[in-house]
Image (cartoon, coloured by chain):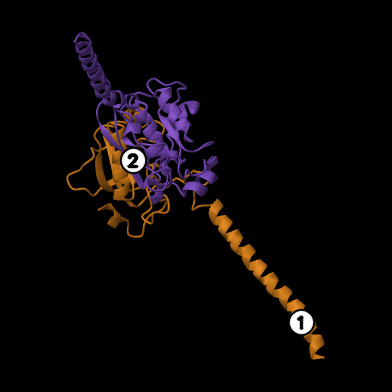
Chain colours: A purple, B orange
């Protein structure tokens, strides 16, 4: 009889332990985009352009209609403001997985959304400040983040996490911190 | 005799046709490469400055100021908001005939502004200004007379192929 009672207690504790493990499993994976089916596809990335002529060869003229063909929503962690980030057709949507799936997915999957703060934008037909040279934003191949906290002409960052920058770098983007613009990422080199 | 002529003519005809085709192909390639290298008037990403003198434009105004120095200081103060891209320019209000009902610039005042030929250009700039929290802006339709460069060229051309660098034939229709 003692053995039977011991077995019952053992079975009860084992069952409770199993329930505890099973119950905690969803919370442990909560927030992981991977658990919701996200994958890093690396599908159909456009070639990385070097300099103006290659940018035009790959993405067309500045401010052309393809430059603003895609849009994704991105919420700033600090203010809750939701931005419509507009970008080039060749970097996302049904054409490629580069920006809206792969870069964005890595940031979400890696719990780095809390490092993306307000002042987020992509395409705009605009010159580089104090020049008449088109910014890479004019092709929809640049993203600014945390722009409310960062300054240009400083080769350091106040708020942009290198963890976020790494996700851009790993997918063909260049971080502007190398040319004094820490809020800026662009899919182009030598421009 | 005929055979001899044919023997002579055939190779030369073939050569002539081949030469003609090569010349056409070369000319075509040259035209294509010229179009690739010189897209419109943009040179290595740099747009020509267009003053907009005499044109009906839409201007997005950041503020009116009593002096040029004040306006320049205001434009410089707002520039960091725009980060790496161009913010507002400075010009004398006297250079503009205002068409928008109810808008009057004080005599002798100076403006911080950015100019556009189309409503789409205005809307895109306002989107940017909203994203970077550049403060309240007012859009005014004007006719420009002289004055400085106010950033024309920073908007898409209605054909969708690139930036709008020149006056449109029916520009006012694009400002509705």
Dot 2 corresponds to which residue?
A: B114
User: Which residue is at 39% across, 37% downward?
Assistant: A39
In the foreground, A129 or B70? A129
Left/right placement of residue A184 relative to residue B28 reads: left
Q: Is residue B19 above or below residue B90?
A: below
Left/right placement of residue A85 relative to residue A129 reads: left
Q: Residue furthest left?
A: B102
| Dot placed on the residue nearer the N-terminal end, 2 or 1 | 1
In the foreground, B66 or B61? B61
Q: Where residue A166 is drawn, which disc sits there?
A: none
Q: Is residue B44 visible?
A: no
For mark 1, name the chain.
B
Q: Where residue B9 is drawn, which disc sits there?
A: 1
Q: Looking at the figure, which quarter contains the N terminus of chain B? A: bottom right
User: What element does badge 1 sit on?
Assistant: helix
Q: Position of residue B150 (x, y in %)?
A: 37, 41
Q: Position of residue A152 (x, y in %)?
A: 42, 26
Q: Is residue B145 visible?
A: yes
Q: Is residue A92 above or below residue B160?
A: above
Q: Residue furthest top?
A: A2
């Amino acid at each position: 009889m003692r053995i039977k009672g011991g077995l019952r207690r053992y079975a009860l504790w084992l069952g409770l332990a199993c329930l505890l493990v099973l119950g905690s499993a969803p919370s442990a994976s909560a927030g992981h985009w991977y658990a919701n089916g996200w994958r890093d596809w690396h599908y159909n990335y456009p070639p990385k352009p070097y300099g103006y002529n290659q940018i035009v060869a790959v993405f067309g003229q500045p401010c052309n209609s393809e430059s603003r063909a895609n849009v994704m929503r991105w919420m700033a962690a600090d203010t809750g403001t939701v931005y419509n980030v507009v970008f080039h057709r060749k970097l996302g949507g049904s054409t490629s997985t580069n920006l809206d799936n792969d870069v964005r997915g890595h940031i979400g999957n890696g719990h780095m959304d809390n490092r993306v703060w307000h002042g987020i934008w992509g395409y705009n037909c605009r010159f580089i400040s104090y020049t008449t040279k088109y910014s890479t934003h004019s092709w929809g191949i640049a993203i600014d983040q945390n722009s409310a906290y960062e300054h240009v002409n400083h080769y350091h960052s106040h708020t942009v996490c290198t963890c976020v920058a790494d996700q851009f770098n790993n997918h063909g983007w260049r971080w502007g911190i190398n040319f004094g613009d820490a809020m800026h990422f662009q899919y182009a080199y030598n421009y | 005799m005929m055979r001899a002529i044919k023997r002579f003519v055939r190779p030369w005809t073939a050569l002539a046709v081949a030469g003609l085709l090569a010349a056409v192909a070369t000319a075509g390639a040259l035209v294509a490469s010229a179009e690739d290298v010189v897209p419109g008037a943009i040179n290595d990403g740099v747009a020509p400055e267009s003053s907009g003198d005499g044109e009906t434009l839409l201007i997005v105004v950041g503020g009116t100021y009593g002096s040029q120095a004040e306006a320049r200081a205001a434009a410089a103060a707002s520039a960091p908001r725009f980060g790496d891209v161009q913010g507002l320019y400075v010009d004398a209000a006297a250079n503009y005939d205002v068409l928008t009902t109810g808008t009057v610039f004080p005599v002798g005042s100076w403006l911080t502004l950015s100019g556009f030929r189309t409503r789409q250009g205005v809307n895109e700039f306002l989107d940017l200004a909203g994203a970077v929290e550049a403060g309240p802006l007012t859009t005014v339709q004007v006719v420009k007379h002289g004055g400085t460069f106010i950033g024309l060229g920073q908007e898409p051309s209605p054909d969708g192929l690139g930036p709008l660098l020149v006056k449109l034939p029916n520009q006012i229709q694009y400002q509705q």
